[in-house]
Amino acid sequence: MAKRDIIQIDEDKCDGCGQCVVDCEEAALQIVDGKARLVKEMYCDGLGACIGGCPTGALTIVQREAVPFDEKATEEHVKRAKEEKPMPCGCPGTLTQSFSTVSEGGSSTGGDNAPKLTNWPIQLMLVAENAPFLKDADLLIAADCTAFSTINVHSRFIQGKKLIIACPKLDNAQFYYKKLIEMFKASDIKSVSVLRMEVPCCGGLAHIVKEAIKESGKDIPFEETIIGIKGAVVSEGKTPLIPELKS
């Protein structure tokens, strides 16, 4: 094997945010056990497109002996990655539903402590790209941990929105990125709010969503709220429209 440029990952610095997975057009990287990993040497072109988005500096390009970059094999790999979608479980509980907030007795519920959820399913893996409840929706995409880290999540964040939850560190970031692109293309979503934790790896969720909006070609307002690990709101506010989408 000859020496060539190839990606190197410092596992001590990697926080598993998944931004590099989204940025790698060759699908050469995956998050495995909470860390970025090189799938196969022949899929890495050594150009370093994945480096710029890494928030921790865990990625560098080094020159070492490695299997040569195989453009044809990489194209086939990328094609397979786009076609192979993790399948929902198929159980009745994944049936798409949109509903009003009602109690088990059938009467409308009220008050700050009442549930505000009006759609099912909520896990991004299970939500169809063209789910009817997404049409004209104000969408909240929340990191899994947020529901358990702060109080009154329903009344403060879910009320008036359709909810989707995801984990940017432990789930398949590349799959979610591709799925969100198709979701934004297929549905006339009015706005997207991201609710995520302050830990660095959770920033990958906002990154994935913003990049998916950009790639979809839609002009969707974006807002991000960050929750501290002690439950306080660290920051919240609207993000200006992505420059590339301005006319």
Image (cartoon, rainbow, N blue to C red):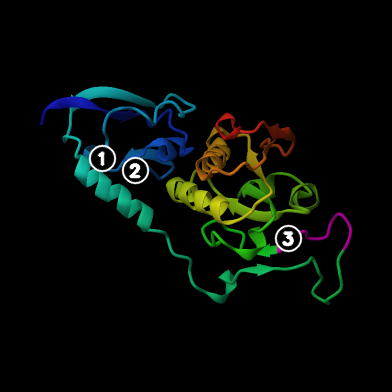
Does the residue at mark 1 contact the one at mark 2 (Cβ under 8 Å)?
yes
Q: Amino acid at mark 3?
A: Leu
Marked residue nearer the N-terminal end (1 or 2): 2
Marks 3/1: CA–CA distance: 42 Å
- The image shows residue 64, relative to residue 107, as above or below, that is above
Question: What residue do we see at 34% from left, 24% from top?
Answer: 60
Label 1 residue SS? helix
Label 3 residue SS? loop
Q: Which residues are magenta?
A: 110-118
Residue 55 located within the stretch drawn in magenta: no
Marked residue nearer the N-terminal end (2 or 3): 2
Question: What residue do we see at 84% from left, 57% from top?
Answer: 113
Instruction: Tell me: 31 left or right of 132.
Output: left
Q: Amino acid at mark 1?
A: Tyr
- Give the class, few, some or many, for how many residues have Cα within 10 Å of label 2's Cα (few <14, many ≥20): many
Give the percent coordinates (x, y) of residue 151.
77, 47
Label 2 residue SS? loop
Q: Which mark is residue 27?
A: 2
Q: Amino acid at mark 2?
A: Ala
- The image shows residue 130, relative to residue 55, as above or below, that is below
Q: Which residue is mark 3?
A: 117
Give the percent coordinates (x, y) of residue 91.
52, 74
Marked residue nearer the N-terminal end (3 or 1): 1
Q: Which residue is mark 1?
A: 43
